[in-house]
Amino acid sequence: MEGNELHTPYTGFCPMTKHYVLNLDPNARYEWDRRTLRDPITASHPALADLIAEAVGAESGSYLVAVNIEVKVLEKAAVEPGNQMPLVEVPTRSQLPQLAEVA
């Protein structure tokens, strides 16, 4: 049967090691800041789909892929209580006299 090569499983294997900084802060103000993963050089969030596409190759198509994630802690830096960003106090309407003049 011709065209069988379309159904042949992709057998490429491309191991790669990437390094990221994981920051865990259960007391963060916003949920999305409680667990952040960033590139240590650019501080950008990793685009996992782009990394997987890089490993698969440039040929278009749909791929069923297996992704193995092995995590090794290379270094842990404790967060000092004084290093947390202070909360900024936002004034209420009663504290803004210029608004009272407009009304």
Image: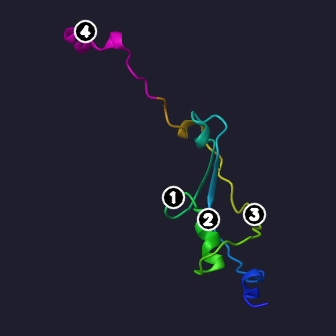
Marks 1 and 2 close (CB-CB < 8 Å)? no
Expressed as whole percent of the image width and height from the top left, the position of residue 61 reads 63, 75
Residue nearest the observer in this picture, 23 or 83: 23
Marks 3 and 4 close (CB-CB < 8 Å)? no
Residue designated by label 2: 49
Marks 3 and 2 close (CB-CB < 8 Å)? no
Q: Is residue 69 left or right of residue 91?
A: right
Looking at the rendered structure, the kind of residue marked 2 is Ala
Which-is-in-front pick, marks 4 and 2? 2
Residue designated by label 1: 43
Residue designated by label 3: 72
The mark nearer the N terminus, 3 or 2, is: 2
Question: In the rendered view of the protein, which quadrant contains the N terminus?
Answer: bottom right
Distance in Å between CA atoms under marks 1 and 4: 43 Å
For the record, the magenta segment spans: 88-103
Which-is-in-front pick, marks 3 and 4? 4
